[in-house]
Image: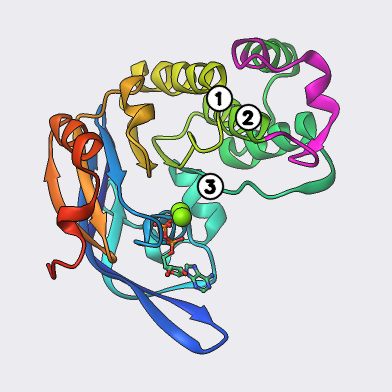
Amino acid sequence: MSTLEIKDLKVQVKTEDGPKEILKGVTLTIKDGETHAIMGPNGSGKSTLAYSIAGHPRYEVTGGTVTLDGEDVLEMSVDERARAGLFLAMQYPVEVPGVSVANFLRTAKTAIDGEAPKLRTWVKDVNGVMERMNLDASFSQRSVNEGFSGGEKKRHEIAQLDLLDPKVAILDETDSGLDIDALKVVSEGVNRFREREGKGVLLITHYTRILRYIKPDYVHVFVDGQVADEGGPELADELEANGYEKYLGTKV
Ligand code: ADP
Ligand code: MG
Ligand code: MG
């Protein structure tokens, strides 16, 4: 059982000109077994929502609550959030020069589980994941995200998702910059995760394309830091046909 509950979340970002309000009261509940898609135009605050849940220091929560199985997420450090079962695949994954993918994955797994994974099964698990994500065996020895292609970055994020096995995965534009083959590999990775017992997914995307491969249970339209509309998967089809125009300029 796992439920991520976001209630009336208000967030401001620290900018050079002072704080700027981005999230204006977001309410959203993700139960285990559910996949929610958040769709919205650029600049609507989708990444801000993802970063706020993950605990990025630049985003200041000014109101509302976030709980995971009743535990106050906003009181937790970034590490505690990860240990509690939250995972964020970032829109722009950061480079970690000098740290190999193999070391990074093992360190992250150890931190999250509180003990080092058993070496034999771990190596097997990593190799299996790399193979499924269509990443070369030598990939593990490269520095994290350094010189990775867009597709490699996203496939590496999903490899992390597979190995770290969180309760709730927040995937921020995991589809952006992918060609059709990489999109399929990434989508299959997400779908394998969804098939596991008790997992929730928050899939953030600008385009409807990925939703042909990952069928959401619910779709939320995000405009100007708020949920402007909600529905089932059919809402994504409507957005594909008509875009976001009908929501823009409407004050909600
Ligand atoms: P989306 O992911 O939907 O494209 P973002 O959450 O990235 O939207 O951005 C929402 C708004 O907040 C934009 O106007 C953006 O310029 C602003 N914003 C987000 N992060 C920062 C930041 N670190 N510094 C300044 N402005 C930011
Ligand atoms: Mg954007
Ligand atoms: Mg974004």
Residue denoted by label 2 = 151
**Label 3 vs label 1, nearer the camera:** 1
User: In the rendered view of the protein, which quadrant contains the N terminus?
Assistant: top left
Q: Which residue is mark 3?
A: 91
Q: Residue at x 74, y 37 (%)?
A: 104
Q: The residue tagged with tag 3: helix, strand or loop?
A: loop
* Residue nearer the viewer, 7 or 233: 233
The image shows residue 144 at horizontal and vertical percentages of 76, 39
The magenta segment is: 129-149
Report the amino acid beneath label 3: Gln
Vertical arrangement, residue 16 with respect to residue 131, above or below: below
Seen at 51% across and 80% down, the residue is: 14
- Quadrant of the image for the C terminus? bottom left
Per the model, the C-alpha gap separating discs 3 and 2 is: 12 Å
Q: Position of residue 64 (x, y in %)?
A: 25, 70
Three-letter amino acid code of the residue under disc 1: Asp
Residue 182: image quadrant is: top right
